Image (cartoon, rainbow, N blue to C red):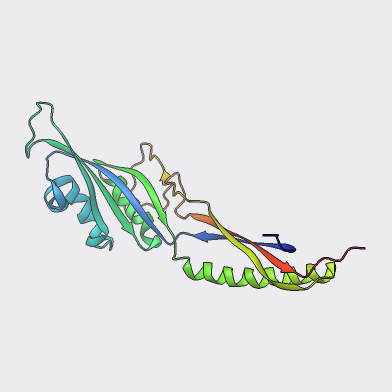
Amino acid sequence: MEKPDTITATVSRREEIGADKVDIHVTIKGSSLVTGSAALKKAREVTQLVSALLEIKIKEEDITLTSVHAESSSGILGKSSSATYRLRIKCNDLELLADVLGVVTAQKNAKLDYLGWRYPDDKKLKDEWLQSCLSEAKEKAGAIAVGLGVRLLGVHAFSEKWLDSEQPEQPYLNEVRGAVLARAKAQSIDLGFPLSHSKWLEMLLETQFRVSEFKTG
């Protein structure tokens, strides 16, 4: 089938979006082995951290045990075996982040692993961009058609591409090197990394419009 005469209009949008939530991933060295979610209430070192987090308004359901790794020099596992517990703490209010990090790093057996930033739902934003870009593409194609002396007849092909600077998401790795942070008494806290984060989102839209026959001569 012969390809019709077309003109192509390309439109793009790009915007920086700030994170509004963050997941704090923590490792805790425990002196006893407790399996399952019971570790949040029965493993002493884990319980200490959980209690401190509840005091600063972190909800119990936002603290999740993601894994338990048992350790035993004798090869026999039991309640007296040491264990490494990994937790995920959901911080749904970034104003609490400094307090959460203060609590975590103040715990003797806790280690801050990384921060996983989360962002607002961008479905509405994407829908708005799509409609705006379609209108702009049509207007742009119309201007090109006028310049070329042809008429727009319809759409021949359409494609959209979304680029996200955090796809796949890269967790924010960090190390707190020898820092012992006071919970609320310190006048200033230097964590060595930012307490806010952003990413950029970009849309590329390409539309091919069918046009009336190009006239030559």
Residue pictured at 37% horizontal, 51% vertical: 186
Q: Nearer the viewer, residue 134 or 20?
A: 134
* Image location of residue 88, percent across then percent down: 29, 51
* Image location of residue 216, percent across then percent down: 89, 63
Position of 124 with respect to 144 (left or right) is left
Position of 198 with respect to 34 (left or right) is right
The answer to whether residue 135 is above or below residue 176 is: below
Q: Which of 114 and 9 is in front in this view?
A: 9
The answer to whether residue 6 is above or below residue 180 is: below
- The answer to which quarter of the image holds residue 85 is top left
Residue pictured at 68% horizontal, 68% vertical: 137
* Image location of residue 62, percent across then percent down: 27, 60
The answer to whether any part of residue 184 appears in the image is no
Q: Which of 180 and 163 is in front in this view?
A: 163
The answer to whether residue 152 is above or below residue 52 is: below
Q: Dividing the image into 4 quarters, which one contains the N terminus?
A: bottom right
The answer to whether any part of residue 89 appears in the image is yes
Q: Which of 95 and 21 is in front in this view?
A: 21
